[in-house]
Amino acid sequence: MSSEMPSENLMATKVTDVGGTVKCNIDPIENQMSALEKMENIETMSKRQRKKLMKQKQWEEQRDLRKQKRKEKRLKRKLERQSQVELSNEGSVRKRIRRSIVPSTLRLIIDCSFDNLMELKDVKKLHKQIQRCYAENRKALHPVQFYLTSHGGQLMDNMNESDKGWINWKDINIKSEHFTELMKKEDLVYLTSDSPEVLNELDESKAYIIGGLVDHNHHKGITYQRAQEQGISHAQLPLGIFVKMNSRKVLAVNHVFEIILAYLEKKDWEEAFFTVLPQRKGAKPLNETTDTSTCKPQELETGSR
Ligand SMILES: C[S@@+](CC[C@H](N)C(=O)[O-])C[C@H]1O[C@@H](n2cnc3c(N)ncnc32)[C@H](O)[C@@H]1O
């Protein structure tokens, strides 16, 4: 008998009817029969007996409903168990993904020493590009050792005003010093589109520098000039080998940063370029015949997608 059956009904298994006979209600049909018999004699029953009989009748009538409810409860519990199993599976997949993150030893620097050459609106754009670099590095499979050097001036003011949270950024080195004060000269490679050298591979023991500049090409060649003055190596990305664009291949800070991250993951420049560079910016594979001469260098420099 179900545990939901009221105790009063259990007592009804031994009911003395008006005729003084003791009835045992083990079988529900027998139970119903006895209820019917009692219904016939209802007039002659005491108030207490009538109440008991009505309760018993109600109990019998709701049998199907109780069965249905039990069924629903069982199904609900089953579904809950299933979703718990799914959740724990998902958790272990996430853990596995987390474990496969292998930080690169490559240092990637954004040189912020051009602050006084920019108008505030361009400093704000640079700030957005840096935010993007930070976010991309945090979710990369092979995150780089990220540095902001010569940090200060308008950029720092803007960061303090619009994104105070930068103070708590993790896995980034924000330094007021110039990169030459922080690293060995022989480790440094300035990335600049004006260099005659073309980068073939990335050397993960090196520190690559990106010019922290949004200048709409007003300061053409400035990073190449700086690299030469400081006597450090320089190189341009091998864009010309894989990408058909306009004649000058000047990219925005975050695009260069993301290409480096993508290359570290894919070990393939072409794939890295095309996962990062938006097609609408005019970048096309070299083997495509579409005319791309309408793309201006400035369009690629605005960055941050
Ligand atoms: C918007 S560009 C600044 C252009 C600036 N007139 C200059 O002389 O570098 C931002 C930075 O991205 C990097 N960059 C852009 N295009 C590049 C390319 N094709 N190869 C290597 N680095 C590039 C350079 O470090 C550059 O300073």
Image: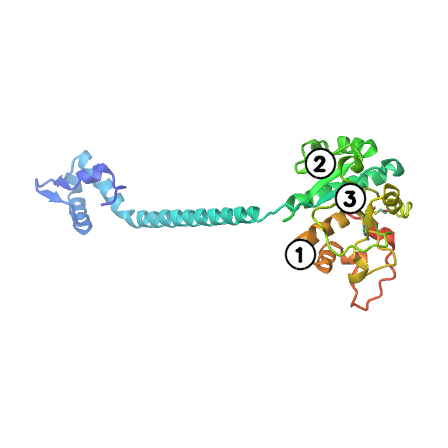
Report helix, strand or loop for mark 3.
helix
Q: Earlier in the sequence, mark 3 or mark 2?
A: 2
**Disc 3 and disc 1: Cα gap in Å?**
27 Å
Report helix, strand or loop for mark 2.
strand
Pointer 1 and pointer 2: residues touching (CB < 8 Å)?
no
Q: Which residue is painted at 79% across and 65% down in the image? A: 286
Three-letter amino acid code at the position of disc 3: Glu
Three-letter amino acid code at the position of disc 1: Lys
Q: Name the foreground residue: 24 vs 293.
A: 293
Mark 1 within 8 Å of ligand 1, using the beta carbon: no
**Disc 3 and disc 2: Cα gap in Å?**
20 Å
- Within 10 Å of disc 1 (Cα), the crowding (few <14, some 14-19, many 20+) is few
Q: Name the foreground residue: 214 vs 13.
A: 214
**Disc 1 and disc 2: Cα gap in Å?**
25 Å
Q: Which residue is painted at 22% across and 37% down in the image? A: 7
Q: Name the foreground residue: 137 vs 74.
A: 137
Left or right placement of residue 69 versus residue 251 in this view: left
Quadrant in the picture for residue 230: top right
Three-letter amino acid code at the position of disc 2: Asn
Pointer 3 and pointer 2: residues touching (CB < 8 Å)?
no
Q: Which of the image's four quarters has the N terminus?
A: top left
Q: Earlier in the sequence, mark 1 or mark 2?
A: 2
Label disc, if present, on residue 173 of the rendered structure? 2
Measured as percent of width and height from the top left, residue 235 is found at 81, 51
Measured as percent of width and height from the top left, residue 179 is found at 78, 38
What residue did someone put label 1 on? 266
Above or below, 219 against 163 in this view is below
